[in-house]
Amino acid sequence: MDEKWHIQLNESISVHINFTNRRFEHMTVTINNQKVPFANTAKYLGMTLDAKLRWKAHVKKKREELGLRYKKCIG
């Protein structure tokens, strides 16, 4: 727990993502001396965000979810 901000972070499920259209060098991010892995997409408040803030990853995931639900209803 951070004493200054009074927040708790779960290092085991956290990822870091850089939102940019430019090429960049990956930074090492640590929380409580544990390295946080880099990811190209991250889920936040139910939305799947990618590094360039495009809808492609979110739409693809939702189509897959709806397709599975639709197949279960039919068959």
Image (tube, rainbow, N blue to C red):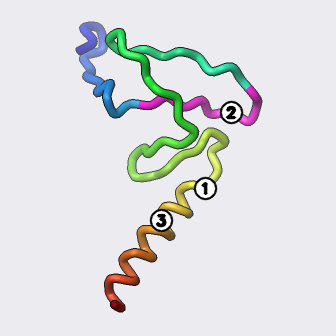
Mark 2 or mark 1, earlier in chain: 2
Compared to 7, does 20 lie above or below? below
Region of the chain picked out in magenta, as a range? 15-23
Residue that numbered label 2 is attached to: 20
Q: Quadrant of the C terminus?
A: bottom left
Q: Residue visible at 46% across and 52% down?
A: 47
Residue that numbered label 1 is attached to: 55
Where is residue 37? Give x, y as percent.
47, 27
- What amino acid is at disc 1? Trp
Secondary structure, mark 1, is loop
Q: Residues within 10 Å of mark 2 (few under 14, many from 20)?
A: few
Decide if residue 16 is on the left or right side of residue 75.
Answer: right
Q: Residue visible at 71% across and 23% down?
A: 24
Mark 1 or mark 3, earlier in chain: 1
Where is residue 39? Give x, y as percent.
53, 35
Q: Residue visible at 36% across and 77% down?
A: 69
- What amino acid is at disc 3? Lys
Where is residue 19? Give x, y as percent.
62, 33
Where is residue 72? Give x, y as percent.
33, 82
Compared to 42, does 64 lie above or below? below
Q: Which residue lies furthest to the bottom in this view?
A: 74
Mark 2 or mark 3, earlier in chain: 2
Decide if residue 62 is on the left or right side of residue 24.
Answer: left
Cα–Cα span, label 2 and label 1: 14 Å
Residue that numbered label 3 is attached to: 62
**25 inside magenta stretch:** no
Compared to 34, does 59 lie above or below? below
Cα–Cα span, label 2 and label 3: 24 Å
